[in-house]
Image: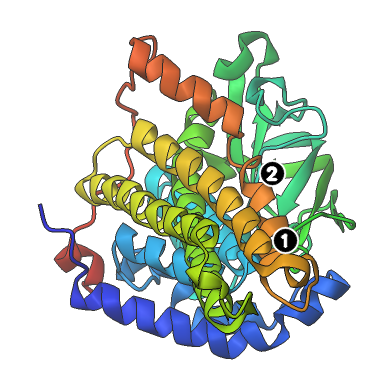
Amino acid sequence: MDFSFTEEHEMVRKMVREFAEREIAPTIKEHDRNQTFDETLLPKMAEQGLLGICIPVKYGGAGMDYISLGIACEELERVDTSARVILSVHVALNSLALLQWGTEEQKQKYLVPQALGERIATFGLTEPNAGSDVASIQTTARRDGDSYILNGEKMWISLADVADNFLIFAYTDKSKRHRGMSAFIVEREFPGVETGTIHGKMGVRAGNTGYISLQDVRVPAENLLGQEGEGFKIAMSALDNGRYTVAWGAVGLIRACLEASVRYANERYTFGVPIGQHQLVQQMIAKMAQRLDAGQLLCLKAGWMKNQGLRNTRETSMAKWYCCDAAFESASDAVQIHGAYGYSDEYDVERYLRNSKGAVIYEGSREIHTILQAQYALGYRQDKPLRCELPAYDQEEWEAEE
């Protein structure tokens, strides 16, 4: 088994790291303090090909593989979580769902401009009273001639106020519970769509998070993604992609914590020596290095399976669960190593700790992933093939012009 990165992977890492340090790092503290989203990032990310990084060239993307998507998420979150969130919702949750489940007409109309960054996309599943319990969503979609009428409200939606396209999940037949859920491509311009921003978040303050209100929104029938009743399957398959990017981002956060802690431990002196020479500080740094290696290996396994076109729900869940817990623990240790300075936003580790907590909750809470992994281990849960699987990566096919 080859654990090395290809030349293309190393190119992606170098490009994204330079981009993040040039375009995000200089202003991130200001945006975090002011709780403002830097919308200038979106066209800049599009110019770099990041908004379609793992979408085939024939659909406007860069034609790279899923490992490249992961590396990009790692390098973005190494600087700040809010930048990685853009790839998670725009690429992983929305665009890859269109690639997997969309008709050719839907791909041409929506996936191509999204991959080019001409339209920004997000994912509308969570509601005020439905998070981990997805089947409890209240949004409805009623067929009316050649359209559906959508009503409901989505909450905690990343990019809610900046997205142009929304992937919305609603019940077309509530009596069937999750088997009566369907997915719809909704445009911001459709009458009845309203959004707003949520303020006062603990972390990811430089990211845009909000709500989507749907009041008698008429959606063309051709904007139904997949078939009626496939919404739950589409949502779960999309979450596999989203969790994959969150896991890679957590690896980037662990790396940032390790780099900051090593730097500070070699500069800060107590009792006449650098604090890095104290064994309990070494213990915390050693654990960060351990978490970094273990987390990256879990992500690489899931990415390899995605590249092969293999179902990876269990592996991605394990990576997300472990990496996000490990990032939170690493950020806490990083603050501890920095002492009183770590409690101030003068140092980045304070922001890392606040940001890291969110990922332990979103994209499947720690508790949900614990239950999932227990059910797999006990034999209670088995993954069945989907009608539409995420396409395996084929370099020649994905990089070929149409």
Q: Residue at x 37, y 31 (%)?
A: 314
Q: In the image, residue 77 lies at what x, y percent?
A: 55, 67
Amino acid tagged 1: Val
Q: Name the residue under label 1.
A: 204
Image location of residue 118, percent across then percent down: 57, 75
Whether residue 112 can be seen here: no
Position of 48 relative to 351 (above/below): below
Q: Are marks 1 and 2 in contact (CB under 8 Å)?
A: no
Q: Say what secondary structure mark 1 lies in.
A: loop
CA distance for labels 1 and 2: 32 Å
Residue 181 in view (yes/no): yes
Residue at (21% x, 72% y) in the render: 400
Relative depth, front residue between 332 and 301: 332
Specify few, some or many for label 2: CA neighbours under 10 Å numbering under 14, 14-19, or 20 or more.
many
| Residue beneath disc 2 | 219
Residue 389 pos. (x, y %) = 32, 38
Quarter of image, res 387: top left
Q: Is residue 286 above or below residue 130?
A: below
**Residue type at tag 2:** Val
Q: Earlier in the sequence, mark 1 or mark 2?
A: 1
* Foreground label between 1 and 2: 1
Rendered residue at 62%/42% (across/down): 360
Whether 108 is drawn above or below 274: the answer is: above
Q: Give the answer, above or below, for where 96 lies relative to 370.
A: below
Q: What element carries label 2?
A: strand
